[in-house]
Image: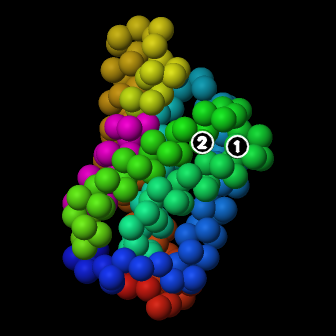
Amino acid sequence: MTEITATDGRWRTRDILVVAVIAVAFGVFFWAFGFAWSALGFLGPAVNLLYGLWLLPALVAPLIVRRPGAALFAELVAASLSAFLGSQWAVDTLVSGLVQGAAAELVFAALRYRRFDLPVVIAAGLAASAAAFVHDWIVYYGEYAVDVVVVIAGSMAISGLLLLPAAAILLVRALREAGALSGYSD
């Protein structure tokens, strides 16, 4: 992905609708993926290599819309829908969405929403993964052995570094090639 300069940052009705559609699609995905996540429990802490899939809206939405708040909006709405549909993490799903979306948002904001190239996408993925890890460590992993927490942290970092950016870029590319994103920058 090349360096792209964002527009003036004002949201159009179309932008709101596109991010909402992204969020709703991922909200349903999150709800369904929760069942798969539970079924993959036999992988132990290595299941966190897939953690980046929970963070996709925080990268996909800003890569398409390129507006301030897109990462936070998409992640929070997706988490809200997932919780509404019956996520096993209940209300904490909202906190997770807030933390994850805000962390990715901070990376885009630090660059004033002017760069959406691979290094920025990777940085946003790592930030979202790090925030997710801190949240989950406080809420879920407090009693885990240190070696297990290290494996979880490493797995989440790998996911944020590799899986999340690759999946986000490939998904956006596929949507562009399908013609679903006409009118949005490459």
Q: Is 125 part of what is drawn in magenta? A: yes
Q: Quadrant of the C terminus?
A: bottom left
The answer to whether residue 40 is left or right of residue 46 is right
Q: Considering the image in quadrants, where does the N terminus appear?
A: bottom left
Q: Which residue is mark 2?
A: 94
Secondary-structure class at tag 2: helix
Mark 1, residue position: 83
Eyeballing the image, is 86 above or below 184?
above
Is 126 situated left or right of 145 in this image?
left
Give 177 or 126, whichever is nearer the viewer. 126
Asked which quadrant contains residue 20, the reply is bottom right
**Amino acid on which the number 2 mark rests in the picture:** Leu
Q: Secondary structure at mark 1?
A: helix
At 37% from the left edge and 23% from the top edge, which residue is drawn? Answer: 151
Read off the magenta span: 119-132
- Residue lying at the far bottom of the rendered structure: 183
Q: Nearer the viewer, residue 98 or 46?
A: 98
Q: Do the residues bearing badges 1 and 2 touch, measured as CB atoms within 8 Å?
A: yes
What is the x, y in percent for residue 105? 37, 56
Q: Is residue 173 visible?
A: no
- Residue displayed at 65% across by 49% down: 80
Q: Residue at x 28, y 55 (%)?
A: 107
Q: Is residue 75 magenta?
A: no
Give the x, y percent position of residue 52.
Answer: 45, 46
The residue drawn where x is 47% and y is 8% is 143
Is residue 185 visible to us here? yes
